[in-house]
Amino acid sequence: MDINLQNKKIELIQWLSTLNDQSLIDKLMKLRTKERTDWWNEISTTEKNSIKKGIQDADNGKLTSHSDVKQIYEKWL
């Protein structure tokens, strides 16, 4: 593991051990919970269906090359 990352973790642990701000601790706990949550469970059904359709299209070879897309949308880029 990167020594710099290890040092940052130790610094955070030391800081957390002295922290007395309950609202900040609550925010950190929410962040921790959110980081462990699967993003798939956080998106809408419409978004899930769109992703599934995109995967199905790709599996069936219904793809448009990057260069074709650039050419189509060039005037807006």
Image: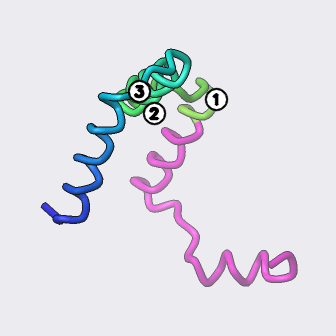
Alpha carbon distance from label 1 to label 3: 41 Å
Residue receiving disc 3: 19
Q: Nearer the viewer, residue 14 or 30?
A: 14
Q: Nearer the viewer, residue 72 or 17?
A: 17
Cα distance between the residues tagged 2 and 3 = 29 Å
Q: Are marks 1 and 3 in contact (CB under 8 Å)?
A: no
In primary-sequence order, the first of circles 2 and 3 is: 3
- Reading the image, the residue beneath label 1 is 46
Check if residue 61 falls in the magenta segment. Answer: yes
Q: Hey, which residue is sitting farthest right in the picture?
A: 75
Residue placed at 45% from the left, 48% from the top? 55
Q: Quadrant of residue 33?
A: top left
Expressed as whole percent of the image width and height from the top left, the position of residue 38 reads: 39, 30
Mark 2 surroundings within 10 Å by alpha-carbon count, few (fewer than 14), some (14 through 19), many (20 or more): few
SS under mark 2: helix
Q: Are marks 1 and 2 in contact (CB under 8 Å)?
A: no
Q: Position of residue 72 (x, y in %)?
A: 76, 77
Count the marks: 3
Count neighbours of disc 3 (C-alpha within 10 A) and say few if under 14, some if 14 to 19, many if 20 or more: few
Above or below: residue 20 compared with residue 68: above
Q: Which mark is residue 39?
A: 2
User: Could you tell me which secondary element the residue under label 3 belongs to?
Assistant: loop
Q: Amino acid at mark 3?
A: Leu
Q: Is the residue 66 above or below the residue 26 in the image?
A: below
- Residue at 24% x, 65% y: name it: 4
Q: Amino acid at mark 1?
A: Thr
Q: Position of residue 59 (x, y in %)?
A: 39, 53
**In front: label 1 or label 2:** 2
Q: Which residues are magenta?
A: 50-77
Q: Is residue 41 magenta?
A: no
